[in-house]
Amino acid sequence: MNRLKSYMQRLSCVGWIALIVVFISQIAVSGTALSAEIAIAAASDLNFAIKDIIAEYEKSTGNHVKLSLGSSGNFYAQIQNGAPFDLYFSADIGYPKKLEEAGLIVPGSLYRYAVGRIVLWTSHTANRDVSRGLDVLRDPRIKKIAIANPKHAPYGRAAVAAMQHFKVYDDAKDRLVLGENISQAAQFIESGACDVGVIALSLALAPTMKAAGTYWEIPSDAHPPLEQGAAILKSSKQQKTSQDFVEFMRGTHGQEIMSRYGFTLPN
């Protein structure tokens, strides 16, 4: 009788354990089902800012973001050819406007998320006085000047326009080293491969870049405004989650992070 009682108690205990395991499994499955993943194509001037925003967003929502960084023009071409992105953040609002005209974005989703700024940046080890502004590019001791490729990178076009504004482009053009995007241009200078370069203020304000070098902010009237635009792609299967991310970015936390990295925010 005692043996039977002990057996029944063990059986009851096993049953409860099995029930708990099933319950926990259901919670895990439910949590997985509720979370979602979106793919974002973002201009590389957002490198540090958007990573901070994504970390906050994932923490608060449980959703996951797959981030691709690159030049706005290259992403524009990829999206035209069916690249599987949900959201597109361009350093030139003109690209998502063209996608809107082509019927490739969700109607009403296009918005201007920021205006970017450019700076002349150099590393501490290069020992170049960028406080002189773009006139320093006339110095023959400066052998290589990094900018983003103006053919497909808005920050590269702004760099060329600024050099033309200050009438130093003809002196500098044969020494330009073109990065595939603005982040690569910054890497060229930080690594010592180039003496100086024109990069995004948002990159210059990142902790690693602030520690490694110094910059001179180029006046905004020296180049066309870097109006930046974002849109949800019509091909996205996660339009609701994409809209949630946009709203998060436009909210208090997202705007604070964008301001911290030097972006001018829309009213």
Image (cartoon, rainbow, N blue to C red):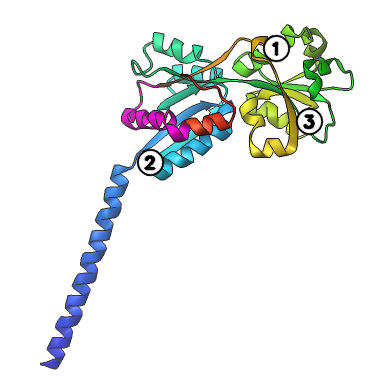
Q: Which residue is mark 1?
A: 162
Going from N to C along the chain, the mark reached first, 2 or 1, is: 2
State which quarter of the image contains the N terminus: bottom left
**Label 3 with label 2: CB-CB less than 8 Å:** no
Asked whether residue 130 is drawn in magenta, I would say no
Q: Mark 3 or mark 1, which is nearer to you?
A: 1
The magenta segment is 232-254
Image position, residue 172 (x, y; %):
80, 13
**Element on which disc 1 rests:** helix
Image position, residue 110 (x, y; %):
40, 17
The residues bearing labels 3 and 2 have C-alpha atoms spaced at a distance of 39 Å
* Total count of labels: 3
196 or 150, nearer to the observer: 196
- Look at label 2 and name its amino acid: Asn
Image position of 204 with respect to 266: above or below? below
Q: Which residue is mark 3?
A: 193
**Element on which disc 2 rests:** loop
**Label 3 with label 1: CB-CB less than 8 Å:** no
Going from N to C along the chain, the mark reached first, 3 or 2, is: 2
113 or 155, nearer to the observer: 113
Q: Is residue 133 left or right of residue 184?
A: right
The residue sitting at 72% across, 39% down in the picture is: 211
The residues bearing labels 3 and 1 have C-alpha atoms spaced at a distance of 22 Å
- Look at label 3 and name its amino acid: Ala
Query: Which numbered dot is residue 63?
Result: 2
